[in-house]
Amino acid sequence: MRSMGKKGFTLVEIVVVMVVVGILAAITVPSLAKYIDDGKKRDCEINRKALLARLESDRALNPGAVMAEVLAENTDISCPSGGVYRAPDDNTVECSVHGKDRSISNKDGNDEGELEEIPRIETEEGMFQPPQLESMKPGNQRELCFRVGDVWFSSMTFADFTDIHNGIQYVPFADGKIYADGNGNFYLQVYNSGHIDKKEDGTYSITTGGMISINSAGILRYEEIMKKDPNRPKDGYISQQVIPKGCIIQGMDGTYYVNIQQINKGVTEPDTLLDKAYNWRPIGLCSK
């Protein structure tokens, strides 16, 4: 046997090692690059939603706030992929690499209280229509329960919320709670910008900025609309269809959620909703 210390590696051995290293690099580098890109895309999405949340918060005090001002005040928030954030209009933040997100509220007081139309959801079985309330019943302590399918959910009417806080000048709706307008429509408060404001005549105005219209036509099941991501078999599911925001979804943990942002087809989500991923907000069941 020859001494490696004296003669070193042969040319054949060096070539073999280089070939093996090249094969390993060809296998691992693309997967690693995709993992990094997905992480940057997710971080950018979180950044955009944080900017939208800031805009909604600013509008609670100043209805004339616009996205351009938010971007100017938050220059430390940047896209990890080098994309540039800009405001194509007063209500939208757009990344030059990853796309855009839009606020629900508008800068002028006339439109801020309007709730956006709920889109229909395409499925193999047909179309989910905009909310068609099946039934309602009173719960405990001014709770209004409403039924979607066979499940009863908890809400409170705007009128009861105003009555409870009568005399207070300004009260934001509780984040993560559902409120009813009395006409069979239900809205989830998000970003804490929806509120009541006492007017000079003693009555209250209701601002619904930041609230998500709930599609009460049916309940989607997480395992039916999300399939395992082969690139992340331990912690990822890929959406099989576009899921407009406002849909009620039953998670694999048995909890019910409303997705507060549209989920595009092909987007990877965690395989459990227990970590309260940003797209999902848990909603409460009726107390009775």
Image: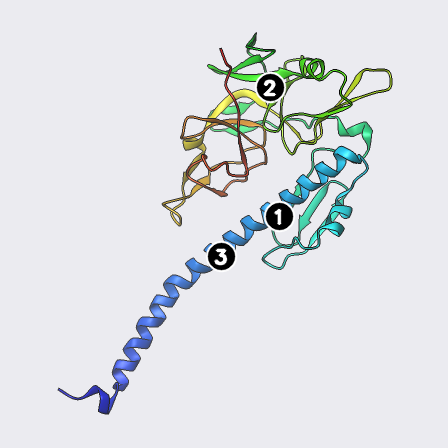
Name the image quarter holding the N terminus: bottom left
- SS state under label 3: helix
Looking at the rendering, which quadrant does residue 258 occupy? top right
Cα distance between the residues tagged 3 and 1: 16 Å
Relative horizontal placement of residue 73, taking residue 47 as reference (left or right): right
Does the CB distance between marks 3 and 2 fall below 8 Å? no
**Camera-nearest label, 3 or 1:** 1
Relative horizontal placement of residue 207, taking residue 9 as reference (left or right): right
Amino acid at the residue labelled 2: Pro
The total number of labels drawn is: 3
Sort mark 1 into few (<14), some (14-19) or many (20+) by Cα contacts within 10 Å.
some
Q: Which residue extends farthest top?
A: 137
Relative horizontal placement of residue 201, taking residue 155 as reference (left or right): right
Residue bearing the label numbered 2: 131
Residue bearing the label numbered 3: 36
Against 159, residue 9 (above or below) is: below
Disc sitting over residue 67 in the figure: none
Cα distance between the residues tagged 3 and 2: 39 Å
Q: Residue at coordinates 65% horizontally, 34% vertically from top-left?
A: 191
* Residue 169: percent from left, percent from top: 78, 23
Amino acid at the residue labelled 1: Asn
* Residue 123: percent from left, percent from top: 49, 28
* Residue 47: percent from left, percent from top: 62, 48
- SS state under label 1: helix
Q: Residue at coordinates 78% horizontally, 34% vertically from top-left?
A: 61
Q: Is residue 207 visible?
A: no
Q: Which one is in front, 283 or 186?
A: 283
Amino acid at the residue labelled 3: Ile
- SS state under label 2: loop
Residue bearing the label numbered 1: 47
Q: Which residue extends farthest bottom?
A: 6
